[in-house]
Amino acid sequence: MKELSKKVNLAPRSQIRELFNITAGRKDVISLGIGQPDFTTPEPIIKANIKALEDGITMYAPTRGQPELIELIAKKLKRVNNLDVGTDNVIVTNGGSQAITFSFATLFNPGDELILSSPNFISYFYCGIFYGIKVIESKRKEDFSPNIDDIKDKITDKTKAILINSPNNPTGYVLTKKEIEDITDIVIENDLYLISDEAYENYLYDDAIHISPASLNGMQERTVTLNAMSKLFSATGIRLGYVAAPTYIIDLMEKYQQYTVAGTNHAAQFGFIAALKMDSQFFEKILKDYNARRLFCYKRLSEMGFDVVKPKGAFYIMPGISNFKISSDDFSKKIIEEKGVAIVPGSIFGSFSDDKLRISYATSLKNLEIAMDRIEDFTKSF
Ligand SMILES: Cc1ncc(COP(=O)(O)O)c(C=O)c1O
């Protein structure tokens, strides 16, 4: 048989998804592996989705998305993110994941370079390969902040874009205003694009604030802003997200959408419309709970001897395991086998995190208490 696609073959199967499969149906396993909030999707979203189906919304959706949805997304971006956007600047996608592939498909040519701070979200690395992009990793500092000088040093004549994800998966790091300005200065000085993945913009703790770089001077015309309903509305399975960008980029994305997926789930878009009409107060109590979980995990992991940076955003914590003299892959494999705790090895988030784990605290405090006791038992055996 002739060889199959090298590009796709090169990417390993997602270890997060593998963990998802191992833990599914196993009552003894506590999963700290999946980036999925544990609260119920708000009722107005479900009801609007069902109503749309009952009303016969089962035909293809407009390629860019339902006009009312696009209008609401543009309004939200103006009101919350301070972006100067209209309906021509938005396209609806199949989750944040497709927002990433749209950006990669439309901004890059094979051989172009994309710089990101590492560790970072797994998909950037492998989607990069699918589109022939050379992903250049700039190692984060010990506290997971970006190394601005190193990013500058990594610019070449092939650099096309910088990608940021703040609040960050997997580190929980939130960029400061100064860091965002430093990065946008580099982007402007070198005539680059900026991809800003803002999927966790609502998960902020302590004094952290979220700033959309497209709202800064001169950035609107060169920034591709990505987001999704997955994390804020606990709706990862609904698969809806969006991109906001200059019209000429959105036009390319629309063309790409026409020939690849043709559009997103039509009825589900009515659920997203309902979501954007909701009063966001529903999230305040949830965030309080997540904050308590964050502080609990930080305290317990620090006490056990992990190197821990207190995260300021998202719902992940990335403890260092160098004290335990074990690779992250072995830690992850052994702890699920021996103690029934699913944890993602840091090795999948780039080249600099094999001495780290990613723990998602999007599960109840009670589960976290049991999981932390099991982790403690496990580390005592070292
Ligand atoms: C940083 C980041 N961007 C994008 C996504 C993909 O989001 P979605 O589930 O909406 O495709 C994720 C999912 O975990 C993520 O962590």
Image (cartoon, rainbow, N blue to C red):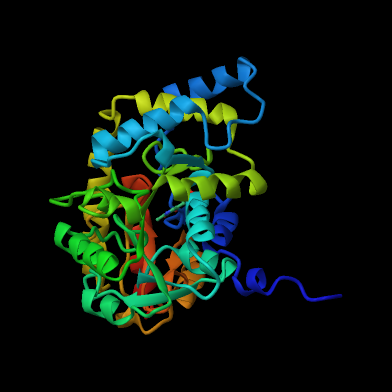
Residue 134 appears in view: yes
- Relative to 66, say whether 264 is above or below: below
Kindly identify the residue that appears in the image at 38 percent across and 69 percent down.
Answer: 357
Could you tell me which quadrant the N terminus lies in? bottom right
Q: Nearer the viewer, residue 16 or 177?
A: 177
Number of numbered discs overlaid on the protein picture: 0
Q: Nearer the viewer, residue 86 or 55?
A: 86
The quarter of the displayed image where residue 183 is located: bottom left
Q: Outermost residue, bottom direction?
A: 325
Left or right: residue 366 versus residue 335 is left
Give how far across and how far down residue 369 sits, in percent. 32, 53
Give how far across and how far down residue 40 sits, in percent. 43, 33
Left or right: residue 160 versus residue 288 is right
- Relative to 138, say whether 58 is above or below: above
Left or right: residue 317 versus residue 345 is left
Give how far across and how far down residue 171 sits, in percent. 31, 63
Q: Nearer the viewer, residue 370 or 13?
A: 13
Residue 339 appears in view: no
Give how far across and how far down residue 274 sits, in percent. 42, 24
- Relative to 121, say whether 241 is above or below: above
Left or right: residue 376 versus residue 40 is left
Kindly identify the residue that appears in the image at 28 percent across and 74 percent down.
Answer: 140
Could you tell me which quadrant the C terminus lies in? bottom left
Kindly identify the residue that appears in the image at 57 percent across and 26 percent down.
Answer: 267
Q: Nearer the viewer, residue 269 or 49?
A: 269
